[in-house]
Image (tube, grey):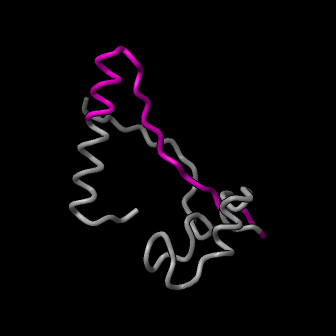
Amino acid sequence: MPAQPEDARRVIANARAALDFAREAGVPVIHVILVYRRIPGLGSEGMVSPFWRALHAAMGEKDRLTPGATAPCASTTSKARPAPRSYPS
């Protein structure tokens, strides 16, 4: 989700510290990319979840998680596909 630059720097720094701590302790770090598929008659498969369905129903134009977005997961049209990526340690 979009964030202000100062918020993004803070989140990235804290994530880096947490991941470094985990790696130093020998904890495997696994990166995951979330993708919602489009389901005919439903929309995004995320809408199967009562939480996301309720959140979508409760949001108005002025209180969205991401300004200008239609819903957190309802309008996602990405299709699941393998996306191998390498993340630096």
At x 35%, y 23%, the residue is 22
Is residue 17 shown above or below 71? above
**Of all residues shown, which one is farthest toward the bottom?**
61
Residue 40, picture quadrant: bottom right
- Magenta residue check for 39: yes
The image shows residue 53 at horizontal and vertical percentages of 70, 65
Residue 14, picture quadrant: top left
Please tell me which residue lies in front, 48 or 58. Answer: 58
At x 45%, y 71%, the residue is 66
At x 25%, y 33%, the residue is 88
**Main secondary structure type of the part rendered in magenta:** loop
The image shows residue 79 at horizontal and vertical percentages of 57, 56
| Horizontal side of residue 26 vs 46, given as left or right | left
**Of all residues shown, which one is farthest toward the right?**
41
Which span is picked out in magenta? 17-41
The image shows residue 37 at horizontal and vertical percentages of 63, 57
The image shows residue 77 at horizontal and vertical percentages of 57, 65
Is residue 12 shown above or below 43? above
Please tell me which residue lies in front, 36 or 9. Answer: 9
| Horizontal side of residue 25 vs 55, given as left or right | left
At x 32%, y 33%, the residue is 18
Quadrant of the image containing the C terminus = top left
